[in-house]
Image: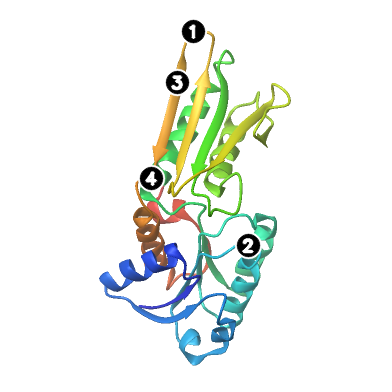
Amino acid sequence: MKIALIGYGKMGKNIEQIAVSRGHQIVSIIDVNNPEEFESSRFKSADVAIEFTTPQTAYDNYMKCFAANIPVVSGTTGWLDKLELIKKLCETEGKTFFYASNFSIGVNIFFALNRYLSKIMNNFPAYDVRMTEVHHIHKLDAPSGTAITLAEDILKNIDRKKEWRLDHAEKDSDLAITAVREGEVPGIHDIIYESDVDTLEIKHSAKSRAGFALGAVVAAEFTANKKGFLGMDDLFHF
């Protein structure tokens, strides 16, 4: 499979290493210093593009991929105000887009566990729920896309919670998300249910970026010959 990499930071380099180890060819690498590469024959020869950049540049990158009829796998977060536009292009123009706020297999199992637990906890109003996420100092958005995904699933399932808020809950119906940026932490997500008598906690801690990179390459393998808007639920059949 021919892969174009858009974004060549630590994640991009991890993706490159894993993709090559799985027998794929990196035909084009695009970063902030060479945007003209989008017009190259190398880029246009790709079977799929894997995009990990910034919230400010992601949407334009998707449009350039779509213009070249290249399927996109993206893990960039912080741009979801345009998500419905991407879905519409997939539906009406036959574009292909795979999005995940987190490509880690373990995190996606954690997503499923969170959905299951929150449905149970809807029946136990004595427990309040809050969340903490910790990431490296280079992460540009807060809370993380993973934390937002977890929070939205909690809000769907727990009637007493209406919206999430960064740092502090202003009212009982708020779900507080504390975002911490320190060191080189790959990612920690902690969901805490607390009552007067006990605390129930589920937690995922990433040990490195390798799990995210592997998931992105597996998603690219899955996406290359498909159409439409796709996600981890499609890949893992959760």
Decide which of tag 2 and tag 3 comes sooner along the chain.
Answer: 2
**On screen, 126 above or below 34?**
above
Which mark lies nearer to you, 4 or 2? 4
Q: Quadrant of residue 200?
A: top left
Establish if 189 lies above or below 38: above
Q: Nearer the viewer, mark 2 or mark 3?
A: 3
Callout 1 secondary element: loop
Disc 4 to disc 1, C-alpha distance: 30 Å
Q: Where residue 206 is drawn, which disc sits there?
A: 4
Of callouts 4 and 2, the N-terminal one: 2
- State the mark number for residue 197: 1
Q: Quadrant of the N terminus?
A: bottom left
Q: Which mark is residue 87?
A: 2
Q: Position of residue 181 (x, y in %)?
A: 54, 44
For the residue marked with disc 3, what is the amino acid? Leu
Residue to which mark 3 is pinned: 200
Front disc: 2 or 1 = 1
Nearer to us in this view, 33 or 62: 33
